[in-house]
Amino acid sequence: MEAILAVTSKLTAPFDLLTMLAEVVSAAKQVLQADGGSVWLYDPATDELILEVASEIEPLRVPAGAGIVGACARDRQIINVPDCYADRRFNPDVDRRSGYQTRCMLTLPLVDHKDVLVGVMQVLNKADGVFDADDETLATALAAQCAVALQRVRMTDALIEGEKLRQELEMARIVQMSSLPSRMPQLPGYDVFGMCQPAGLTGGDTFDLAILDQGLLAVLGDATGHGIAPALSVTQMQAMLRMAFRLGASLETAFTQVNNQLADTLPDDRFITAFIGLLDVKAHRMRFHSGGQGPILHFHAATGDCDRHKPTSFPLAAMPLTTLRPAVTLEMQPGDILVLLSDGIYEYHDAANEQFGEARVRELVAAHHGKPTAALSTILLEAVQAFAKGAPQDDDMTIVLVKREVQS
């Protein structure tokens, strides 16, 4: 009993997993006066037992249910084998690989306080004979303490890894958000606004609004998937576009070259839908190409209607391009608004799986077109959230609005 209490006290100390496994084996050998021991951890994802630590034995995996250790895990019962080589379930391969001679073996399930199988402990070769009923009683008490200690270490490791991942995602979010415009460009006669609200810490959406020599650059991009990889893709696209235009590239050249470069570098299953447009603020013309990004809405203040434009090309990185269809040109009259929304808004659905849809967007823009673009953006987001009635955000939501102001 003193040995059990000493071991229990020792196992409450903070250990990493491998150190804890070594302590468990050491405790079992001490309490049961055994020559050797091993611990197999149960992996529920693969339904396998993994030998993580054992004297002079390399780690290995076996299906749960195979051999003595598997039978113990399956039935959750102690198995006391006085003569291992006389038991047909015993696998002598481990002995042959290690040079160790196993005589007798006590195998115990490690089940925590919530009746969850943690693993299996095996104690080998009692110093003065074979394991008896008293040894089984001692081993049962020890196994209960070891199971709880091992589960605690696993949970601690999982929390630490989760925190590390959270910190890495937070850093990726900071990097991604820093690539977005820190403030909206100020253009005479125009009111522009953009925002991005990722579904998670990082997202696959991006936008850009920047004053260049060629005019106002307006970009909305949406990469396939969620998380760090899509965030890197759209950030890469945005940086390449900025560089191309600052080097004097035309709209067609920038679109084609960025597409082809992304097609060479991104995996085959990755692509980016993107609107890329240049606004001539003097002529009030917006020329754009859209790689799979749509719908593109042009609200006409004079009539209260919205024109709907489709994509002009395949998504960026879908395939190399040598030619493009002609760019679409929008004539921006006073009060007109270019409305660019990612599919996270159009496809946001409520608990009944009904989507917010394009019609609601059109109605909101028509009803509130006289407001500043920042206010209109807020109205759109609040309408989506009210429609969802608490349904979670499954996709990134991005808004880009370019409005020609009405001169008083």
Image: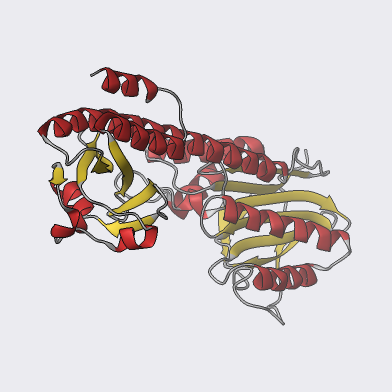
Q: Nearer the viewer, residue 362 or 182?
A: 182
Q: Quadrant of residue 365?
A: top right
Looking at the image, what colour scheme do you see? secondary structure
Q: Give the side of residue 8 with respect to residue 373, left or right.
A: left
Compare residues 201 and 149 and report the one nearer the observer.
149
Residue shown at the point (47%, 34%) measured from the top left: 16
Residue 336 visible to an observer of this rendering = no
Left or right placement of residue 100 versus residue 277 in this view: left
Decide: is 408 above or below 396: above
Among all residues in the image, which is located at the extreme left?
133
Quadrant (top left/top right/bottom left/bottom right) for the N terminus: top left
Query: 191 or 220, which lies in front?
Result: 220
Asked if residue 213 lies left or right of residue 408, the reply is right
For image coordinates 63% across by 44% down, the residue present is: 172
Query: Which residue is rendered at x = 76% and y = 60% of the image?
Result: 241
Spot occupied by residue 319 in the image (x, y as percentages of width and height):
62, 77
* Percent position of residue 291, x then y: 62, 68
- Does residue 343 appear left or right of residue 179 in this picture? left
Measuring 75% from the left and 40% from the top, which residue is drawn there? 184
Q: Residue furthest bottom?
A: 322
Specify the quadrant that holds the C terminus: top right
Whole-percent x, y for residue 232 in the image: 64, 54
Image vertical order of residue 345 relative to residue 289, above or below: above
